[in-house]
Amino acid sequence: MVRGSRFIATLTRVRDPRAAEQFVEQVRSEFPDASHHCFAFVAGPPGSTTRIGLSDDGEPHGTAGRPILEALLHSGVGEVAAVVTRYFGGTKLGRGGLGRAYAGGVKLALETLPTVEKIDRVELRIEIAYGALDALFRWLDEHDGVRLQEAFGGAVTLRAAVPVREVAALERVVADLTGGAGRVERL
């Protein structure tokens, strides 16, 4: 409650603007008698402004959607939408008060929001000698690599998924471990 007005912040994961729009409509139908349903979304990686959206939903321009968006952009969370539902309490809050109330509600909701780190991975085929296998497995474990399939023949052929940022380092490690004989190929 802020000077008689009730603010309810509702957040969810969204992967694209269409999902964000559907979420806003869902919240509107949940609170049909509310005065405003102001929202913002970041439908990409944390801090990205490529796929964003916002609405003041009848509040004075820049007093609701923008503060909500700023809270999301500075939260370190991506693929997220926030709708702040307001039940007007009879006292005008002014531009600054509205901005603080809308952003504050989102910040409070973000504090308890369960998050999961998303890691973009590349699938690779790795050929390596048996003697280097343990060292490669340790490297994969230490660098968020995922072993997908192993085949044992004259050498070991391993299918693995590694974070995009680690591909060049893996190529160097395989070359070092095998004296340049190992191979790494993107699938």
Image (cartoon, grey):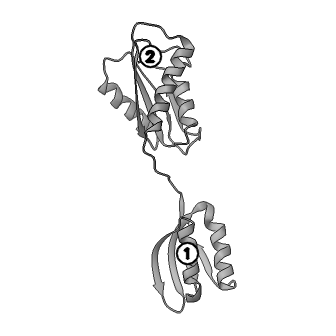
* Residue with the mark numbered 1: 138
* Helix, strand or loop status at disc 2: loop
Instruction: Assess disc 2: are there few (<14), some (14-19) or many (≥20) residues with their C-alpha within 10 Å of its C-alpha.
Output: some
Residue 8 visible here? yes
Q: Nearer the viewer, residue 9 or 35?
A: 9
Task: Count numbered badges in the picture.
Answer: 2
Q: Specify which label sits upstream in the sequence, 2 or 1.
A: 2
- Percent across and percent down for residue 5 are 40, 14
Judge left or right: residue 60 versus residue 172: left
Position above or below: 95 against 164:
above
Tell me the amino acid under the disc marked 1: Arg
Q: Which mark is residue 71?
A: none
Tell me the amino acid under the disc marked 2: Val
- Which quadrant is home to the N terminus? top left
- Percent across and percent down for residue 74 are 58, 36
Residue at 43% over, 39% down:
112
Cα separation between marks 2 and 1: 54 Å
Residue at 42% over, 44% down:
114
* Helix, strand or loop status at disc 1: helix
Residue 187 visible here? no
Residue 34: which quarter of the image? top left
Judge left or right: residue 115 versus residue 28: right
Instruction: Assess disc 1: are there few (<14), some (14-19) or many (≥20) residues with their C-alpha within 10 Å of its C-alpha.
Output: few
* Residue with the mark numbered 2: 2
- Percent across and percent down for residue 184 are 60, 76
Position above or below: 103 against 75:
above
Residue at 58% over, 73% down:
139
